[in-house]
Image (spheres, rainbow, N blue to C red):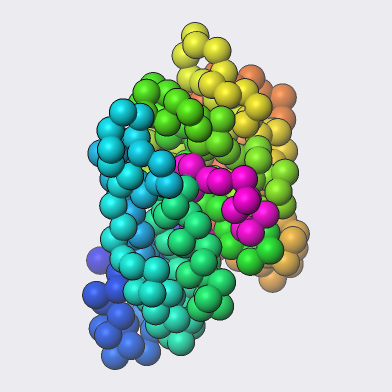
């Protein structure tokens, strides 16, 4: 199966229960999985710190509307910090799921206490005091803009008193955080152009932009949807992963972004898709 993987590049995450198995294989962050021509490498340790918005289990400072619940913590603060220390000792970055604002605070605390590196996944509700900590601690905000659209109604229902700091992508950007845009597939479509359209427009239908103050500039959304090496796009010696589009994404409207057509895909210097004659 691994030997047949040639058309995409994968950073495969590890769950805490698989740490011993990865140790036995000698895998650390960035290790190449044998038989994949370098296409599959060991990625981050995936850790959950709370639940989700729709199930009312995301961990928050204040209760959900009239509901007395403040969500669920998957680990105590000490347990969370210890997990991140284990990751650092094994030279693994961490992808730490944290949705509620209290979960985000505890996630940042754990990164700070452990010295681990990585990302906070989702970060759907953030206190103002925590925004600058992303940049200070060099923790990536890995977010999924389509969720802001899909969950606008439930957010207005249960976080009505704090919706202005939900899915706060522009606030993160302005605070200096490094943003990564993703899909959380299959929860949202595995399509980076749908993701970018959501980030720059905060709507996908005839409704007005939801909290338009959180829209991302086009250039920032594109930058957050790519991976650059040492701050540059493509130079000799880089992996050679390139796409060519039929429409200029800087000029496309949000609806056009959602329908973008890819003319050429190159992975590791090899053409994997082309509509060019």
Left-right relation of 33 to 265: left
Examine the rendered structure and indicate whether residue 206 appears above or below residue 103: above
Q: Which image quarter: residue 252?
A: top right
- The answer to which of 50 and 187 lies nearer the viewer is 50
Q: Where's the N terminus, which quadrant?
A: bottom left
Q: Residue at x 42, y 31 (%)?
A: 159
Coordinates of residue 119 in the picture (x, y in percent): 51, 61
Q: Residue at x 36, y 65 (%)?
A: 47
Q: Give 248 or 104, whichever is nearer the viewer.
A: 104
Read off the magenta span.
119-134
With respect to residue 36, does 100 lie above or below? above
Q: Is residue 254 left or right of residue 40?
A: right
In front: 108, or 47?
Answer: 108
> In the figure, is residue 94 to the left or right of 201?
left
Count how many numbered circles sit on residues in the image: 0
Going 45% across and 37% down the picture, which residue do you hit?
A: 191
Q: Residue at x 54, y 21 (%)?
A: 210
State the residue in front, 156 or 201: 156
Q: Quadrant of residue 157?
A: top left
Residue 18 in view in this figure: yes
Assess whether residue 132 is covered by the magenta stretch: yes
Counting from the top left corner in percent of width and height, residue 275 is at 53, 35
Q: Residue 178's spot in the image, x, y percent?
A: 65, 54
Quadrant occupied by the C terminus: top right
- Inspect the magenta stretch and tell me whether residue 139 lies in it: no
Q: Is residue 275 visible?
A: no
Residue reaching furthest to the top: 206
Residue 59 x, y percent position in the rendering: 36, 49
């Amino acid at each position: 199966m691994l030997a047949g993987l040639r058309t995409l590049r994968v950073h495969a995450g590890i769950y805490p229960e698989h740490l011993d198995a990865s140790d036995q294989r000698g895998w650390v962050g960035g290790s190449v999985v044998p038989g994949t021509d370098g296409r599959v490498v060991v990625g981050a340790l995936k850790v959950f710190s709370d639940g989700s918005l729709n199930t009312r289990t995301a961990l928050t400072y204040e209760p959900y509307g009239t509901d007395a619940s403040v969500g669920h913590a998957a680990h105590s603060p000490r347990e969370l910090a210890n997990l991140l220390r284990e990751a650092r000792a094994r030279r693994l970055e961490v992808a730490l799921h944290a949705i509620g604002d209290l979960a985000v605070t505890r996630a940042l605390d754990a990164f700070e206490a452990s010295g681990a590196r990585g990302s906070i996944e989702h970060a759907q509700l953030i206190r103002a005091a925590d925004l600058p900590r992303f940049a200070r601690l060099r923790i990536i905000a890995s977010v999924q803009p389509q969720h802001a659209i899909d969950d606008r109604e439930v957010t207005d229902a249960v976080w009505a008193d704090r919706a202005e700091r939900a899915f706060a992508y522009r606030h993160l950007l302005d605070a200096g955080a490094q943003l990564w845009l993703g899909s959380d597939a299959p929860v949202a479509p595995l399509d980076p152009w749908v993701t970018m359209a959501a980030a720059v427009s905060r709507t996908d239908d005839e409704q007005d932009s939801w909290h338009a103050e959180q829209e991302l500039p086009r250039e920032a959304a594109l930058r957050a949807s790519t991976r650059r090496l040492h701050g540059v796009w493509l130079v000799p010696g880089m992996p050679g992963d390139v796409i060519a589009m039929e429409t200029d994404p800087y000029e496309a409207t949000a609806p056009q972004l959602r329908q973008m057509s890819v003319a050429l895909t190159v992975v590791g210097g090899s053409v994997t898709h082309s509509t060019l004659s």
